[in-house]
Amino acid sequence: MQQTSETNSGNSDLASSIGDSWQDLLNITADPPERRTKCESCKRPKVVCWCSSLPNPPLDIDSTIVILQHPAEEKRTLRTALMLQLGLKPGKCVVYKGKKFPTPKNQTELEPILKSENSLLLYPSKTSVPLESIRQQAEQSGEGPFTLVLIDGTWPQAKAMYASSPLLHTMRQVKLIAVGTSDYIIRTQPTEGCLSTLETAAQSLAVLENRPELRTLLVQPLHTLCKYQLDNGAVEHQSKEFRIKNNQYPKQIGKRLNRLLNYSNICRPEAKDAEGHNEDEQHLNEIRNYTTSVSNS
């Protein structure tokens, strides 16, 4: 009799618990939780919007930037191509997405651009020439304005996009010589000299238009983004090259990174007069121009 009483009591407690849980479930609102308000321009939450650091008004330039963007780049939270679009006058920076170009969707618009004699592909191939020399020639001949085409993706992605786009092979190809150090300090770069898409374009425009201030003005939103991230728990990242040289790199060095590091000393500005290292310089510049970071890109 006592056991039956205890059993009934247990069942009653269980039923009560289930009833309470069911009531809690019924009290959950069907509406999704309120999300943070986003900026209409940069699409980031307004509390972390970097639009106040954009050039105002947007910069007017003679050149035009065309970005051939790998689809995976659109998914990245901290991408920089949008900063470039918003920092320049409307129509001065156009983005096309795909894995090969032109695509059936954009062929009518993009193919004439890629075939134009005044279009330059920033890609460090064996035939690419320093962007500085293009500017010097243009000053003498009156050639221009130019359309600068950039491939936006990791180095493996960029290389695959180039390989699968025969029309890109026919373009005049250029490269940056003095790239400096990246301001994208919340990302780990492979070497000292890898730049983000924004920085690559800004540096190229500064050279091509002979306006050094363009780089400073266009990169300001990136500084704002990095400052916010650092103020809220992010840490400043040194390049893998720096960490390895200072015995701070915790992982085994892979073949690709090891090769890159072996080339990096050859390609420093102070070693430009060294002979017999053209292929080494080309390989390092290839990776620097298109690798934002190993973890991000």
Image (cartoon, helix red, strand yellow):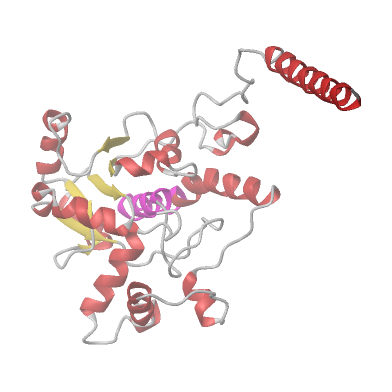
Magenta-drawn stretch contains 211: yes
The reply, left or right, for residue 280 in relation to residue 252 is: left
Give residue 147's position: percent from left, percent from top. 23, 43
Q: Nearer the viewer, residue 22 or 40?
A: 22
**At 24% across and 71% down in the image, what residue appears?**
282
- Relative to 57, say whether 77 is above or below: below
Quadrant the N terminus occupies = top right
Give residue 152's position: percent from left, percent from top. 32, 48
Please tell me in which quadrant of the rendered image residue 207 appears. Answer: bottom left
Q: Nearer the viewer, residue 238 or 126?
A: 238
**At 26% across and 59% down in the image, what residue appears?**
131
The reply, left or right, for residue 2 in relation to residue 76 is: right
- Relative to 4, say whether 177 is above or below: below
Find the residue positioned furthest to the right.
2
**At 35% across and 53% down in the image, what residue appears?**
210
| Overall secondary structure of the magenta section | helix
Residue segment shown in magenta? 197-214
**At 22% across and 78% down in the image, what residue appears?**
278
Quadrant the C terminus occupies = bottom left
- Report the number of discs: 0
